[in-house]
Image: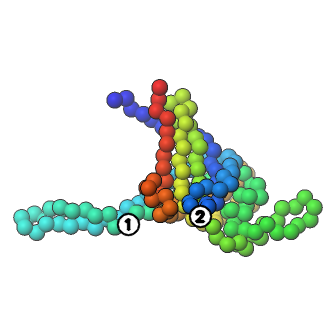
Amino acid sequence: MANRYFRGQGTVKIGTRDSAGAPVGLRSIGNCPMLNIAIAEEFSEHYESETGDRRMDLKVRTSLKVDITFMIESFDLANWLMAFNGAAGTGGAGEEVVEAFNADRVDYYMRFEGMNTLEGKNPITVNLFKVDLSPPSSLDLISDELVGLEMTGSVLYDSLNEDLGGYFTITQVAPA
């Protein structure tokens, strides 16, 4: 079997969810140079006590946590509103006003529509069913470098997509 290596690029889309857990109004967040899904499990371990060796004979997962981190480099109104849980305010002609932390929190549906640049740009799609985003921990307003917003959040278990694992799916095209 040949090794399959991965180097990804693509588009990150985000939208809300309907009552069945399906995506609504997916839109591109613009250039996103970093997207990471982190998975953490905790276990309860059981050790036998019959042989005197206390060998582990059972391991039960007690928790599963899925987190997401990504970078936004496009500072359009929709991204500002999403990042700072904001409501669109009223400004003067040609102004976009974000009233930070002035909107109800929502659970988002995220989709990565990408490609594996090491396999002839074969498509890969990752659907994250229910994402709870936190505001960025900082906002650089003065910098000599291109500014981005690092976003973090939790991928919550979604019982509406339980038949698909409840968290996310990965679909890729096999190489020719």
- Whether residue 153 sits left or right of residue 95 in the image: it is left
Helix, strand or loop at mark 1: strand
Label 1 sits on residue: 63
Judging depth in this view, the residue of 125 and 143 nearest the camera is: 125
Q: Are the residues tagged 1 and 2 within 8 Å (C-beta)?
A: no
Residue 115 in the image: above or below residue 165: above
Helix, strand or loop at mark 2: loop
Label 2 sits on residue: 19
Q: Which image quadrant for residue 17?
A: bottom right
Residue 101 in the image: above or below residue 111: below
Position in image of residue 61 (x %, y %): 32, 63
Residue 44 in sight in this render: yes
Q: Residue at x 41, y 60 (%)?
A: 40
Residue 98 numbered mark, or none = none
Q: Residue at x 87, y 61 (%)?
A: 95
Residue at the extreme front of the image, as rendered: 20
Instruction: Tell me the colour scheme of the image.
Output: rainbow
Q: Estimate how packed mark 2 is, as few (under 14), some (14 to 19) or many (20 or more) residues with alpha carbons within 10 Å.
A: few
Q: Residue at x 73, y 61 (%)?
A: 80
Residue 116 in the image: above or below residue 29: above
Q: How many labels were placed on the picture?
A: 2
Q: How much space separates mark 1 and mark 2, taking CA atoms?
A: 26 Å
Residue depth check, mark 1 versus mark 2: number of the one nearer the observer: 2
Three-letter amino acid code of the residue under disc 2: Ser
- Whether residue 74 sits left or right of residue 1 in the image: it is right
Q: Which image quadrant for residue 5?
A: top left
Q: Quadrant of the N terminus?
A: top left
Residue at the extreme right of the image, as rendered: 93
Three-letter amino acid code of the residue under disc 1: Ser
Position in image of residue 83 (x %, y %): 67, 62
Position in image of residue 152 (x %, y %): 57, 61
